Image (spheres, rainbow, N blue to C red):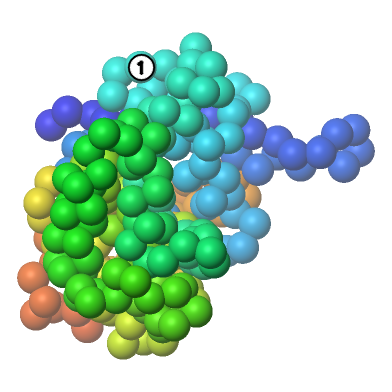
Amino acid sequence: MKKIIIGENIVKSFGEGNEKLQVLDGISVEINEGEFIAVMGPSGSGKSTLMFALSGMDGVDGGKVHFDGKDLSVFKENELADLRRTKMGFVFQQPTLLKNLSILDNIILPSMRDNRKNVTVINEKAKTLMKKVGIAGLERRDITQVSGGQLQRAGICRALMSNPKIIFGDEPTGALNSKSAQDIMDIFTDINREGTAVMLVTHDAKIAARTERILFMCDGKIVSEMRLQKFHGTDMDDRIKKVTAKLQEIGI
């Protein structure tokens, strides 16, 4: 299977002098096309920093990150921005939507940069995605007129507009109730089944148990890994038990 991301001996620190803190300590990781992966660990273990490094959102102090065979360190900032906009999608705990735009306009905004002459096509694609994730009919709603779960679905639509090779999610269900969280995970599962790789940072064993591979981090290192079968909806309790047992085993 083709590797979409290869991280080699990644090192990342913040601060200077006596306050310098190494957040990633020589991490090597690979992500395959179409893989569904979760990253777990305590606060401060480097989960989000690893995601930012692998996506080129943040530079690294040492090591290399290759995306789709290309070394991200040779890219200029504007080239990295273009790469993220066209090949990657991002979903965060709090959807980063603009208050002065409708739900539909928020979804299509990043795509307009490259497709100003195809507004009709962009709008139709966005509406198709909105129907797919269950928010059809909310196109003209203001972001203050919908629920948190609906906002997160809009964020997923925006992330999918460019047909990305991978979706990165940083605690994408962290601000949602359990029902909305599982609904969002159903959407991620469908996205993955259609061939898009998904990488989620999460504290929640229920969320991680829906993925195929889990990386466990502590103190800037990957300390363990677990592989699961594809989720089919019938073995959730067993999957959660396995994840919880692994967390207890490695003490995180």
Against 209, is 75 above or below? above
Q: Residue at x 28, y 24 (%)?
A: 68
Q: Residue at x 38, y 76 (%)?
A: 141
Asked whether residue 239 appears in the rendered view, the answer is no
Left or right, 122 with reference to 66: left
Looking at the image, the residue that sits furthest to the right is 18
Residue 113, how many percent across, how many down?
Answer: 39, 35
Against 228, is 80 above or below? above
**Front in this rendered view, residue 75 or 215:** 75
Residue 132, how many percent across, how many down?
Answer: 15, 66
10 Å neighbourhood of mark 1: few (<14), some, or many (≥20)?
few
Against 39, is 18 above or below? above
Q: Which residue is mark 1?
A: 70
Q: How many marks?
A: 1
Residue 66, how many percent across, how many down?
Answer: 38, 22
Residue 241, how many percent across, how many down?
Answer: 29, 78
Q: Residue at x 47, y 44 (%)?
A: 51
Asked whether residue 55 appears in the rendered view, the answer is yes
Secondary structure beneath label 1: strand
**Amino acid, disc 1:** Lys
* Quadrant housing the N terminus: top left
**Front in this rendered view, residue 42 or 241:** 42
Q: Residue at x 33, y 82 (%)?
A: 180
Against 42, is 16 above or below? above
